[in-house]
Amino acid sequence: MHRCSGSPQIGGPHIEIFHTPSRRRIHQVTASDNTKFKGSLKNYFEALISINNDPIPVSSCWRIKDGIPLCPGKRMDNRYLVVSLPLLYSVEIGDERITCQDATKDLQIWDFPPTLMPDTDFSAENYGLIYDLVGLALRNLEGNHFIARYASIDRGTIYTYNDMEHKGCPVEEPGAKFSTHMFGKNIHLPDGFVVYQVFHLLRGGAKAQDKFFDLRTSALTNRFNFHFSTSNLDKIFSMTYHSEDFVKLDSRKRTWLFNPFRSTTLEYVSRNPPTDNVITDGSLDPESEEETIPKKPGTSGTRDSPYHISPAPSSNSSLPDSLFGLDCRCGIVGDGNINYRADEHGEAIQCDECKNWSHVACQRDGRASNLTRNSIFICDFCDPRHILPLRVSERK
């Protein structure tokens, strides 16, 4: 949910929300998450599902066209509001250093809990709304071989599966305990292996999943004035925003979007704007000729294309008055003038839909690395081709 204070010239405050939910394609914790949460996956998870996190300031309103800001307001985002939980919650440890020569230096060390609590103790006890640790995926330091470790139902026996040994059959780890080989901060691991993924299973299954959806949609309705199209997970649902102070903006007026009629977002504007001078054509008259020139992030970096900035040879800062909202999957979010370091992070790329920037090197499968000069780039959050939408499967 994005909020902007707006200005009298463009009709006052406005709000943008995602109309349809999306599933996180890859759930990954990064080095910055490791530092922020001091290696506690429990603390990370609690922050992830919380709806009480402080909104994050963003460098500019989302109303930008051809690099020109159309709104001078101050923007604040409530990011990643979790509506539903997966039955199997898997977390990937995003550590690019694994394949480096000095792979053992500064690897992420996480404290993996035996259980995770999405809600209250009451919900855990009465609805099975609790995650139990069931398995680990391990990979070697070269990053080219994976093995699996998991526990029996009673957690009394630990098994390891390595397709290169024991004819591809899982074997019992002699003397292994759940407390020493599955959870905690100092897990006993095979030589040369690190934890790559951790898996938690929702104890109450689909019923617990439904209960969380019921609790969460009620909480989001009360706190953010959301309205959900369905009360259960049997149908693909959508969201709208309802407030006496705001009214939905006609898609035809959202001319700053690449394709407003296919956008996954909805926008709402003040029902009683400060003046009648409300923007209708998606543009504002610049006060000077300089304002028609889009400012580029980076002090000495140069544009290789309309969508890239090259790394600056030695500078660690950007122009203080440039518009540079950074939102990258590596975990770096906020004002790019503060958080972006060209010599360390390399090239950045801007989404033509939401106008946020992210590191080219952080895009999965290298899909942002070989774009031509006139290529259009739509990030994972905006492009439905790169987001796995929620799909309804048979529920028993």
Image (cartoon, rainbow, N blue to C red):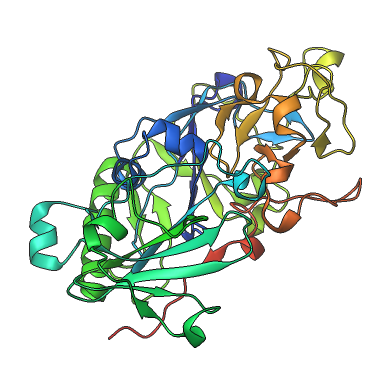
Where is residue 348 shown, x and y percent of the image?
Answer: 74, 36
- Relative to 221, say whether 13 is above or below: above
Front residue of 199 and 108: 108
Where is residue 187 shown, x and y percent of the image?
Answer: 34, 52
Front residue of 10 and 95: 95
Residue 225: name its quadrant.
Answer: top left
Residue 214: name its quadrant.
Answer: bottom left
Q: Residue at x 54, y 67 (%)?
A: 146
- Relative to 131, say whether 64 is above or below: above
- Relative to 375, say whether 277 is above or below: above
State the quadrant of the C terminus. Answer: bottom left
Query: Is 242 positioned to the left or the right of 175 in the image?
Result: right
Q: Residue at x 26, y 56 (%)?
A: 180
Q: Is residue 57 visible?
A: yes
Query: Is 188 positioned to the left or the right of 298 in the image?
Result: left
Q: Residue at x 81, y 23 (%)?
A: 312
